[in-house]
Image (cartoon, rainbow, N blue to C red):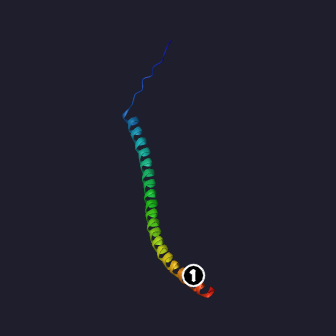
């Protein structure tokens, strides 16, 4: 069986074209990764802000629950006095 073998020769110009194509592909991918990293960073900042707001809301809720419990006790006492 006969096989043909083709010799592949690289010239300086073809190698330079290859390097330029590789460089442009690399730069595009690098920019895409940088953009994704910025988006992830922005998302993390928003999540941290939401966590901070949530902790503030939880503390406000705890205070309001204390006030509600006190008012409920007053209301129960008033209802007990009226029903007697």
How dense is the environment of label 1, judged by Cα within 10 Å: few (below 14), some, or many (20 and up)? few
Secondary structure of the residue carrying numbered label 1: helix
Which quarter of the picture shows residue 83?
bottom right
Q: Nearer the viewer, residue 18 or 40?
A: 40
Task: Report the label total.
Answer: 1
Is 45 in front, or is 36?
A: 45
Is residue 13 shown above or below 5? below
The single residue placed furthest to the top in the displayed view is 1
Q: Position of residue 70 (x, y in %)?
A: 50, 80
Tell me where residue 17 appears, x and y as whole percent: 41, 39
Quadrant in which residue 72 is drawn: bottom right
Question: Where is 68 relative to 54, above or below?
Answer: below
Q: Residue at x 43, y 51 (%)?
A: 33
Question: Dividing the image into 4 quarters, which one contains the C terminus?
Answer: bottom right
* As drawn, 66 above or below 51: below
Residue 47: image location, x then y, percent: 46, 62
Q: Is residue 71 above or below residue 1?
A: below
Q: Nearer the viewer, residue 72 or 84?
A: 84
- Residue at which label 1 appears: 76
Give the farthest residue toward the left: 12
Give the left or right position of residue 75, taking residue 6 as reference.
right
Write the residue at 60% across / 84% down: 79
The residue lying furthest to the front in this view is 84
Residue 45's image quarter? bottom left
Question: Could you tell me residue 53's position as x and y percent?
Answer: 46, 69
């Amino acid at each position: 069986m006969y096989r043909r073998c083709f010799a592949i020769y690289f010239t300086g110009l073809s190698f330079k074209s290859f390097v330029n194509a590789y460089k442009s592909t690399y730069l595009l991918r690098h920019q895409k990764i940088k953009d994704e990293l910025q988006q992830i960073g922005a998302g993390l900042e928003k999540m941290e802000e939401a966590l901070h707001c949530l902790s503030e809301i939880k503390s406000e809720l705890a205070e309001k629950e204390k006030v509600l419990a006190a008012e409920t006790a007053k209301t129960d006492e008033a209802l007990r006095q009226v029903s007697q």
